[in-house]
Image (tube, rainbow, N blue to C red):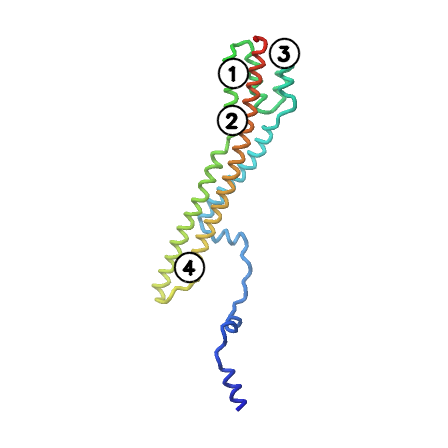
Amino acid sequence: MHTLLQIIDSTQPLGPQTALQQTAVPATSEMTLFDLLMAGGPVMIPILICSVVAVYIIIERLIAINKLSKDPSNFMNNIRDYITSGNIDAAKALCKNTNNPVARMIEKGISRLGKPLPDIEKAIENVGNIEVVKMERGLSALATCASAAPMLGFLGTVTGMVRAFYDMNMEYQRTHESINIGVLSSGMYEAMVTTVAGLVVGIIALVCYNILSAMIKKVIFKMESSSIEFLDLLEEPVK
């Protein structure tokens, strides 16, 4: 009797936990970042191009604008001393040896000394506009990357879903059986990876675009305040 109970007990169905333990599939090796990006499909190529262009512009503009924003100490005070003492050549030399937009604006103003004040102001303003255009170089391309990368990611999502449902349809027509989840997974990979990649590139590009724009605005404020100070200096003898 005891032996019969042992045989019956051994033939009972396995519990859920036991069945899962016996049918568990060994964990596969972790997917690398390169493998994950490759799963995104062909749409990842323009997203990668956007990321490379954005990184180049961000680094190049950060270095350039940071150099332009450096204002030598007592620059305007030295210009004031040279102008009031009549040492125009020293003022020009100081401007030429100073590599920033303010110095180039003041140099243009000094070269127009002797002409009517509105003409001097207009010349300084023109130089200022040129310097602003130089500082903003590449920002339009960065803004394009910030807006295009998420859209490309959404495009990859759509194409990935289309491919997933197409593969499901082909699999059903071939086997006339329920769809294997593996058929759907490859298209879902493409859909999700491109969305994430596009959003990451777009967010980083947008944040850096706003940072660079704020840095440029600070330089423009310095340019405007220095030009006003210079024009006030030219009006002092008239007062």
Label 3 environment density (alpha carbons within 10 Å; few <14, some 14–19, many ≥20): some
Q: Residue at x 49, y 34 (%)?
A: 139
User: Dot 4, crowdedness within 10 Å: few (<14), some or many (≥20)?
Assistant: some
Dot 4 amino acid type: Leu
| Circles 4, 3 touching at the beta carbon (< 8 Å) | no
* Measured Cα–Cα span from mark 3 to mark 1: 19 Å
* 232 vs 194, nearest the viewer: 232
The residue indicated by pointer 4 is 184
Element assignment for label 4:
helix
Q: x and y percent of residue 150 in the render?
A: 45, 44
- The residue identified by callout 1 is 121
Q: State the image coordinates of residue 222 (x, y, percent, origin top left).
A: 57, 25
Sooner in the amino-acid sequence: mark 2 or mark 4: 2
User: Which residue is identified by label 3?
Assistant: 84
Amino acid marked by disc 3: Thr
Q: Residues within 10 Å of mark 1 (few under 14, many from 20)?
A: some
Q: CA distance from mark 2 to mark 3?
A: 29 Å
Circle 2/circle 3 CB separation < 8 Å: no
- Nearer the N terminus, badge 4 or badge 3? 3
Disc 4 versus disc 3: nearer the observer = 3
Which badge, 2 or 1, is on the more N-terminal residue?
A: 1
Label pair 4/1, CB-CB below 8 angstroms: no
